[in-house]
Image (cartoon, rainbow, N blue to C red):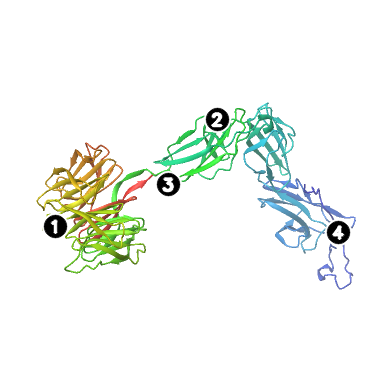
Amino acid sequence: MRSILLGLFIGLAACSENRSGPSAPDECSGETCLEPFSNSDQSSTLQLEQTYTHSHDILVSWDEIPGITEYTLDLAEDEACLLPKKTLSVTGLSVHLIDLEEGVWYLCLKSSQGLPVGSKSQLLVVDRQGPALDGALEQNLTSGGQPALAIQDRTETQCRWTTNDDRLKIVQPGTLLSTFTIEASGTYPATLICEDLANNSSIFSLTLNVAVGAAALGPAPADVVSLAATPAVNSVSLSWADGGGAQSYLVLASSSPITATPLNGMFYSVGSLLGGATVKAVSNATTLVDTSLPGNTTRYYKVFAASTTGRYAAGVAVTATPIANKVLKSSFTRNGLLAYSEVLGVRTSGNYSYVCRGVAGLSIVNVSSPANPTQTGFISMGNTSTSGWCSDVKIVGNYAYVANWDKGLIVVDVTNPAAPVMKDSFPLTNASVVYVEGNFAYVAVEDNARGGGLAIINISNPDDITQSSFTPSSGHGAGIYKIGNFVYLTHRDTGTFKGLKIYDVTTPVSPSLVRTISRPSMEDIDVRDNHAYITVGSAGLEIFDVSTPGNPISRSTIATTGNGVVLGVSVVDNHAFVTDYTFSKMYAIDVSNKTAPTLARSYSANNGTLYLHVNGGFVYMTVENRGLEIIEVFQFL
């Protein structure tokens, strides 16, 4: 504790008119002069009501010194008052310090001529803040132990403990680091009251988690084994197995790494907090589903095996990131546009969109910033004004498989998006669209001479692809998808056959037709969750149940507003996105009820909408004579 200085006795002396010597100041001639640090019989005492104070009005006074009516009071931060921060001129024997800044001050009295009166300064500590607690308001300790606390203040403090729980014994109630003892582990309330020398006080309400010694609780069980965390939409499922000796399990969850450990002998309730983590479960179950979680945010868990007496194992940690719930935005707006004069098929993978540009070839577009798409790479694939027309593209691994209208199926290595390399091709007349799975590419062909059909290409060696089979379909293949061992091939209204043909491709060299469904026209196809979504021209979108792929069952059909010609489709979760070429629109269709789909949202483009692909929260859509448009359609919760 700083020493409390009650006052300073300040000596003074008079110097006569005939004083001589080189150090005698000129102003001493003919008047009273004070000799610094003198010890004359005449003295004055600086008087303070309190050396340590929180007052905004501090009275400083002193005794009269004969011959002096005007004084100077210096306020400095150094004891010798060599560098005063404030200097007050005073007529009389007192002064009020109003709203003096908090801090440690030294007061020095001088004559109006600036000569020191006395030999010492007076300490004044201004402190208007109560003591601050350095330490957590929730403390874990073992019976007989002390909390980890400290007090921060300008002056020394005195603290005392109280509690309203008689089970908690405070061994030294007047000491900050008192020892606490209990008979049974538990959570106990305690109040700490601290007061400093300036009469500022603070009251802290603490929670003490006090445990009995581990030795009295018997052995700890082994840690759990096979702990796994499986993420789902806005949830995480945990599972584990007993490692030996466990009677129950304590599960903690947090949005940050868990460092807390339970106190031996203490039993926790679900929903309580332990070192910032939340108690999610206390039971003998070996599974847990944590729900209502934000998506795309890492969740931290720690599972502690416990004995019947509450002795805990060290704990095993695991993390998982819940899947975000994609919610359709209330309205659609275009985020980005990359202008191309001719476009058709599009596929997006990772940060890149692969855009078929007809005669020009294939462009690779960086869409990592959807608002600012930029072309990274390009390959013509040998296209000329009279030969070659990029129609459709699919991405598998580091390869792009391109259906090129005049040149057939082309394999492009896109390992380096800035420098794509053509690996091989197989000639097909009017290759329209392509689907890739395993070692085979399935190509829809519009071939007037051969009647169109299904080409199956072996792509096991990208440098040397070969045709396994070609099956005429008497129509112009427009869309293709493989479900199990069956290929669905749609036909538009320009060929002899119009509608859907289903082929069994268990043996790729000899596919067999198993089902035919006639429609005025069929275009694109996408499949999700045992349902096929097929665009059917001006009739809109038709939904088929394909639980039995060889025998699809039509569930419903929905047209767009005005019965425009619907071309492209891409399905995500319970929404099918389609293009309406006639009216230059893109629609989001709610297909959660397969038998009664509804139009949910629409987006208007500036020209005929062609084909699209949904990836993440965005639709990547080709628009006739406009290029690639990027539209944000989902928000993630």
325 vs 380, left or right, is right
Element type where label 2 sits in the image: strand
What amino acid type should be assigned to the residue bearing mark 3?
Asn
Q: Which residue appears farthest toward the left when viewing the image?
A: 496
What residue does disc 3 label? Answer: 296
What residue does disc 2 label? Answer: 248
Check whether the beta carbons of the residues at disc 3 and disc 1 lie within 8 A of each other.
no
Check whether the beta carbons of the residues at disc 1 and disc 2 lie within 8 A of each other.
no
Element type where label 3 sits in the image: loop
What amino acid type should be assigned to the residue bearing mark 2?
Ser
Spatial CA distance of label 3 from label 1 is 47 Å
Q: Nearer the viewer, mark 4 or mark 3?
A: 3
Q: Nearer the viewer, mark 3 or mark 2?
A: 2
Q: Is residue 373 visible?
A: no
What residue does disc 4 label? Answer: 12
Spatial CA distance of label 4 from label 1 is 121 Å
Element type where label 1 sits in the image: loop
Residue toward you, 174 or 553: 553
- Mark 1 / mark 2, whichever is N-terminal: 2
Spatial CA distance of label 3 from label 2 is 31 Å
Q: Nearer the viewer, mark 1 or mark 2?
A: 1
What residue does disc 1 label? Answer: 447
What amino acid type should be assigned to the residue bearing mark 4?
Leu
- Mark 4 / mark 2, whichever is N-terminal: 4
Residue toward you, 466 or 112: 466
- Mark 3 / mark 2, whichever is N-terminal: 2
